[in-house]
Amino acid sequence: MQKIKLLLLNFKRLNFRTAFVNCFSNGNRNQNLIVCFGRFKLSIKKNAEINLQNGFLFLNKPMRAKEPFVGMLEMNEHSSINVENIFTIHSGCHIVLLENAKLNLGSGYINRNVKIRCYQEITIGNNVAISENVTIWDSDAHKIVGKEDQMTQPISIGNHVWIGNNVTILKGVSIGDGAIIAAGAVVTKDIPTKCLAAGIPAKVVKENIDWN
């Protein structure tokens, strides 16, 4: 019933890309839908997959009636997006998955203008709130001589995590359940569960926090 209500609420905003991505992209979706909004560009290789376990994936969804931001999703050879529950990515998203990369999404939302570059694996948990202009990269994209094996490392963002505006999350980072990342922080190291982290680089400034 919840899925039907979601589809009806967003029916007027559906477009050709929604039909295309659901009909012609691979993946196990269990009668769930990928819903695309507005000015949204798709480039999905034939052997890439979008898998939906128990809910819809909303892509480039506007926060208001009309927004000028263009969204983009590029999925290269054998890459996959795996969605556990209902997940919304708002307008202006710029998401690229390299060959064999995995983007795992639980539930929640990412606000406007997110930039995600997934070279290996990025996992985002359930009930997350990710604000505007956030950057998430699991790779340096270029190799440092003598440290070639450290160029790409997976990222894990836990359940019930709140990430503020203009945050950058870099390779190899794990953010624990219930954590808050303050606006403008650059996360280069692990952040423990239920901690508030801030600054460049991000450091824990408060422990045993709760938010809702």
Image (cartoon, helix red, strand yellow):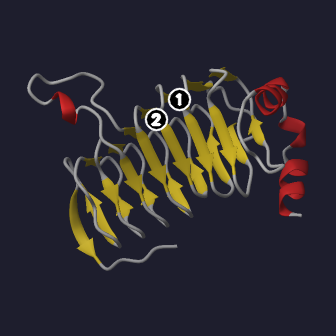
**Is residue 79 something that shows in the picture?**
yes
Q: Secondary structure at mark 1?
A: strand
Whether residue 81 is situated above or below residue 185 in the rendered picture: above
Q: Position of residue 29 (x, y in %)?
A: 76, 46
Residue at figure coordinates x 27%, y 49% from the top left: 187
Residue at figure coordinates x 14%, y 24% from the top left: 144
Find the distance from the CA under tag 1 to the CA under tag 2: 6 Å
Q: Quadrant of residue 210?
A: bottom left
Q: Residues within 10 Å of mark 2 (few under 14, many from 20)?
A: many
- Quarter that holds the N terminus: bottom right
Q: Secondary structure at mark 2?
A: strand
Whether residue 195 is situated above or below residue 117 in the rendered picture: below
Whether residue 15 is situated above or below residue 187 in the rendered picture: above
Residue at figure coordinates x 23%, y 47% from the top left: 188
The image's mark for residue 94 is: 1
Q: Position of residue 203 (x, y in %)?
A: 20, 59
Q: Are marks 1 and 2 in contact (CB under 8 Å)?
A: yes
Q: Position of residue 69 (x, y in %)?
A: 62, 27
Q: Is residue 114 left or right of residue 205?
A: right
User: Which amino acid type is shown beneath numbered disc 2?
Assistant: Ile
Q: Earlier in the sequence, mark 1 or mark 2?
A: 1
The image's mark for residue 116 is: 2
Q: Quadrant of residue 42?
A: top right
Task: State the residue lying farthest toward the left.
Answer: 146
Q: Is residue 206 left or right of residue 133?
A: left
The image's mark for residue 32 is: none
**Is residue 61 something that shows in the picture?**
no
Residue at figure coordinates x 91%, y 49% from the top left: 8
Q: Position of residue 127 (x, y in %)?
A: 56, 64
